[in-house]
Image (cartoon, helix red, strand yellow):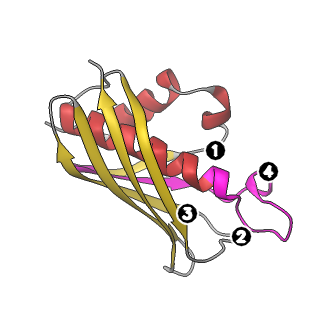
Protein backbone atom coordinates (compact mmCIF):
# COMPACT_ATOMS: atom_id res chain seq x y z
CA UNK A 1 0.00 0.00 0.00
CA UNK A 2 1.63 3.24 -1.09
CA UNK A 3 0.86 6.94 -0.75
CA UNK A 4 1.20 10.09 -2.83
CA UNK A 5 4.22 12.41 -2.68
CA UNK A 6 1.96 15.12 -1.18
CA UNK A 7 0.94 12.75 1.65
CA UNK A 8 4.60 11.87 2.22
CA UNK A 9 5.57 15.57 2.32
CA UNK A 10 3.00 15.96 5.13
CA UNK A 11 4.79 13.18 7.04
CA UNK A 12 8.00 15.18 6.72
CA UNK A 13 6.46 18.39 8.04
CA UNK A 14 4.58 16.69 10.90
CA UNK A 15 7.18 14.27 12.26
CA UNK A 16 10.68 15.69 11.91
CA UNK A 17 12.72 18.12 13.97
CA UNK A 18 13.07 21.70 12.67
CA UNK A 19 16.73 21.19 11.77
CA UNK A 20 15.77 18.22 9.53
CA UNK A 21 13.10 20.38 7.89
CA UNK A 22 15.83 22.96 7.22
CA UNK A 23 17.32 20.45 4.74
CA UNK A 24 14.43 21.39 2.44
CA UNK A 25 13.68 17.78 1.50
CA UNK A 26 10.76 17.09 -0.79
CA UNK A 27 9.32 13.81 -1.99
CA UNK A 28 9.62 13.33 -5.76
CA UNK A 29 8.36 9.77 -6.23
CA UNK A 30 7.12 6.81 -4.22
CA UNK A 31 6.81 3.14 -4.98
CA UNK A 32 5.75 0.13 -2.98
CA UNK A 33 9.24 -0.29 -1.48
CA UNK A 34 11.07 2.89 -2.47
CA UNK A 35 11.12 6.63 -2.02
CA UNK A 36 12.91 9.29 -4.05
CA UNK A 37 13.52 12.61 -2.31
CA UNK A 38 15.26 15.80 -3.40
CA UNK A 39 17.49 17.96 -1.24
CA UNK A 40 17.97 21.38 -2.82
CA UNK A 41 21.42 22.93 -2.92
CA UNK A 42 21.99 25.40 -0.11
CA UNK A 43 25.11 27.23 1.00
CA UNK A 44 23.79 26.76 4.56
CA UNK A 45 24.43 23.03 4.17
CA UNK A 46 27.90 23.44 2.66
CA UNK A 47 31.18 23.15 4.47
CA UNK A 48 34.50 24.85 3.78
CA UNK A 49 35.36 24.48 0.13
CA UNK A 50 31.71 24.63 -0.92
CA UNK A 51 30.77 20.94 -0.78
CA UNK A 52 27.59 19.71 0.90
CA UNK A 53 28.35 18.49 4.40
CA UNK A 54 28.38 14.79 5.15
CA UNK A 55 26.03 15.39 8.08
CA UNK A 56 23.37 16.80 5.74
CA UNK A 57 23.76 13.86 3.36
CA UNK A 58 23.52 11.34 6.20
CA UNK A 59 20.42 13.02 7.62
CA UNK A 60 18.82 12.98 4.16
CA UNK A 61 19.57 9.25 3.78
CA UNK A 62 18.14 8.52 7.22
CA UNK A 63 15.00 10.57 6.55
CA UNK A 64 14.42 8.91 3.18
CA UNK A 65 14.21 5.54 4.94
CA UNK A 66 11.36 6.79 7.11
CA UNK A 67 9.47 7.94 4.02
CA UNK A 68 10.08 4.62 2.21
CA UNK A 69 8.83 2.62 5.21
CA UNK A 70 5.81 4.91 5.60
CA UNK A 71 4.95 4.55 1.91
CA UNK A 72 5.23 0.76 2.14
CA UNK A 73 3.02 0.68 5.23
CA UNK A 74 0.57 3.25 3.87
CA UNK A 75 1.05 5.64 6.80
CA UNK A 76 3.64 6.93 9.23
CA UNK A 77 4.40 4.65 12.15
CA UNK A 78 6.79 5.28 15.03
CA UNK A 79 10.26 3.95 14.19
CA UNK A 80 13.86 4.56 15.13
CA UNK A 81 17.25 4.15 13.51
CA UNK A 82 19.18 1.14 14.77
CA UNK A 83 22.14 1.39 12.40
CA UNK A 84 23.35 3.56 9.53
CA UNK A 85 26.50 3.19 7.47
CA UNK A 86 27.46 5.78 4.86
CA UNK A 87 30.26 5.92 2.32
CA UNK A 88 31.04 9.16 0.49
CA UNK A 89 32.25 8.86 -3.08
CA UNK A 90 32.35 12.40 -4.46
CA UNK A 91 31.64 15.95 -3.32
CA UNK A 92 28.44 17.72 -4.32
CA UNK A 93 28.84 21.42 -5.05
CA UNK A 94 26.17 23.75 -6.37
CA UNK A 95 23.67 21.01 -7.19
CA UNK A 96 20.58 19.37 -5.71
CA UNK A 97 20.89 15.83 -4.42
CA UNK A 98 18.48 13.00 -5.29
CA UNK A 99 18.10 10.47 -2.49
CA UNK A 100 16.61 7.09 -3.34
CA UNK A 101 15.83 4.68 -0.51
CA UNK A 102 14.96 1.12 -1.51
CA UNK A 103 13.66 -1.23 1.16
CA UNK A 104 15.50 -4.54 0.93
CA UNK A 105 13.48 -6.13 3.74
CA UNK A 106 10.36 -4.92 5.50
CA UNK A 107 9.38 -7.05 8.44
CA UNK A 108 6.92 -6.60 11.25
CA UNK A 109 9.51 -5.12 13.62
CA UNK A 110 12.50 -4.19 11.43
CA UNK A 111 13.21 -2.58 8.09
CA UNK A 112 16.40 -2.58 6.02
CA UNK A 113 17.17 -0.10 3.25
CA UNK A 114 19.87 0.75 0.72
CA UNK A 115 20.13 4.43 -0.15
CA UNK A 116 21.87 6.14 -3.06
CA UNK A 117 22.58 9.86 -3.06
CA UNK A 118 23.15 11.28 -6.53
CA UNK A 119 24.32 14.70 -7.70
CA UNK A 120 21.24 15.82 -9.66
CA UNK A 121 23.30 18.04 -11.96
CA UNK A 122 25.87 15.50 -13.11
CA UNK A 123 24.06 12.25 -12.38
CA UNK A 124 27.16 11.06 -10.52
CA UNK A 125 26.85 8.94 -7.39
CA UNK A 126 27.83 11.04 -4.37
CA UNK A 127 27.25 8.58 -1.53
CA UNK A 128 25.71 5.26 -0.53
CA UNK A 129 24.13 4.38 2.76
CA UNK A 130 22.45 1.42 4.39
CA UNK A 131 20.05 1.68 7.28
CA UNK A 132 18.34 -0.63 9.74
CA UNK A 133 15.22 0.58 11.51
CA UNK A 134 13.23 -0.75 14.45
CA UNK A 135 9.51 -0.40 13.78
CA UNK A 136 7.78 0.58 17.00
CA UNK A 137 4.18 0.84 15.89
Residue 41, x across and y down, in percent: 67, 60
Q: Which residue is mark 3?
A: 97
Above/below status of 121 relative to 40: below
What is the C-alpha distance between the residues marked 4 and 2?
12 Å
Q: Which residue is mark 2?
A: 94
What is the C-alpha distance between the residues marked 3 and 4?
14 Å
Q: Which tag, 3 or 4, sits closer to the chain's start?
A: 4
Give the secondary structure at mark 4.
helix
Q: Which tag, 1 or 2, sits closer to the chain's start?
A: 1
Q: Which residue is mark 4?
A: 44
Q: Quadrant of the N terminus?
A: top left
Q: Is residue 46 magenta?
A: yes
Give the secondary structure at mark 1.
loop
In the image, which residues are magenta? 30-56
What is the C-alpha distance between the residues marked 1 and 3?
11 Å
How would you rate the neighbour count of disc 4 (Cα within 10 Å): few for under 14, some for 14-19, many for 20 or more? few
What is the C-alpha distance between the residues marked 3 and 2?
10 Å
How would you rate the neighbour count of disc 2 (Cα within 10 Å): few for under 14, some for 14-19, many for 20 or more? some
Residue at image x 74%, y 53%?
Answer: 45
Give the secondary structure at mark 3.
strand
Q: Which residue is mark 1?
A: 23
Residue at image x 28%, y 38%?
Answer: 69
Classify residue 68 by image quadrant: top left
Classify residue 101 by image quadrant: bottom left
Can you tell which mark lies on residue 69? none
Amino acid sequence: MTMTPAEADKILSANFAPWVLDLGLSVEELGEHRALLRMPWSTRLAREGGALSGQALMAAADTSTVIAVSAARGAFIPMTTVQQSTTFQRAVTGSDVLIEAVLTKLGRRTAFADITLTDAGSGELAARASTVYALLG
